[in-house]
Amino acid sequence: MPVVTIPSASLTPTPEESRSFCAQLEAGDILYFPQSPVPLASDDTSFLLGQQQADSSLHKNIAYKPAIDRLSGFDAKTANPAAVERLQRIMRGYSSSVVQFLTSFLAPYQQHWKLDYASFRPQEEQGRDLPLRRRNDLLHTDAFPTRPTHGARILRFFNNIHPARTRDWIVSDPFAATVRQFAPKEIAPRPGSALSRIGKASARAIGLGAAIPSLKRSPYDDFMMRFHNFLKENPRFQADCPKYSFQFPSGSSWMVYTDTVPHAVLAGQYALEQTFLVRPEAMVRPEISPLRILEEIAHAPLV
Ligand code: SIN
Ligand code: FE
């Protein structure tokens, strides 16, 4: 079972312990905190749980961008401004608490990450009607269509804030084992391909008139995006791969490198999440990073 339980007594690790937590994450383990080290105040939780009823424009998954202190993903025309302001304050506080906790808990990564988006996920995950590539109940590794990472790793920290229910995940074997079953025979890194620009439609969707150079995907990003789609579209993998299930209880937290651990959420409602993009030079085990593994398969640099 790839889940490592962190007791409350281990929340302030020594430098060696911190390094070993990083190594466990990089090897594909989920670090699980039975009681979240970044709990939400109970009136904030009640507010978030009430949004579905109170304001239908705030019932979708909502992103918070810490760098510009902005919420997105709701209809600003119909949302209640006071509710938006409160949600923004809660997300700002959550984001900075997670950063503060991980700055010491994962000390070797400190200053080597880019703080990405946080999200509030109020929707029931079971039975969501989404297009196949957007479904999160199929096992997949994460890749962002509009935010290429150029080798940086996608680390995600979650809180289950549902008052009673678990959030139900399945995971499969980490990247090295999974990717080697398929690459390079069925899906290959394309080292020679020119950097591909993000499409005009995606650029428009994130508020840019045209694709700009910083949005160019590296061959690494190109592979990670195709691999995400490949896994979701592969019924044989979905049916036959090794599966480990875990139910994260109400009030718990967990974190995992979602770019390399195939994961799916089958059921659950109301979660908070903060994403970090951790730069390759911060890895304590660079030899098992997805960039290194893919470069070995491709026999060429990919960023
Ligand atoms: C995902 O990253 O696939 C979704 C995980 C979750 O919302 O629990
Ligand atoms: Fe995912």
Image (cartoon, rainbow, N blue to C red):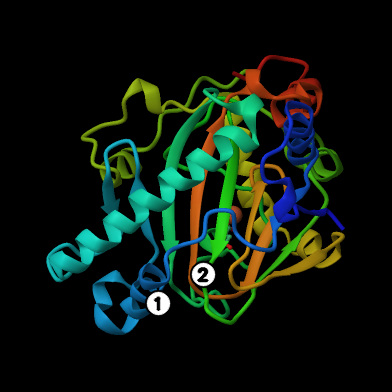
* In-front residue for pair 173/28: 28
Give how far across and how far down residue 229 sits, in percent: 61, 51
Q: Is residue 127 above or below residue 61?
A: below
Which of the 4 quarters of the picture holds residue 160?
A: bottom right
Q: Are marks 1 and 2 in contact (CB under 8 Å)?
A: yes
157 lies above or below 52: above
Q: Which residue is mark 2?
A: 161
Dot 1: few (<14), some (14–19), or many (≥20) neighbours within 10 Å? some
User: Which is more toward the observer, 103 or 152?
Assistant: 103
Q: Which part of the image, by quadrant, shows the N terminus?
A: bottom right
* Neighbourhood count class around disc 2 (C-alpha, 10 Å): few under 14, some 14–19, many 20 upward: many
Q: Establish if 119 lies above or below 96.
A: below
**Res. 27 in view:** yes
Disc with the residue nearer the chain's start (1 vs 2): 1
Residue 63: which quarter of the image? Answer: bottom left
Q: Which residue is mark 1?
A: 49
Disc 1 C-beta below 8 A from ligand 1 = no
Q: Residue furthest front?
A: 9
Q: Please state which of residues 23 and 243 is positioned toward the viewer in this rendering.
A: 23
In percent of width and height, residue 39 lies at 51, 60
Q: Position of residue 115 (x, y in %)?
A: 45, 35
Residue shown at 49% from the left, 40% from the top: 99
Q: Report the residue at 40% width, 34% height from top.
A: 198
144 sits to left or right of 11: left
- Amino acid residing under circle 1: Leu
Q: Is residue 203 above or below residue 63?
A: above
Which residue type does callout 2 highlight? Ile
Label 2: which secondary element: loop
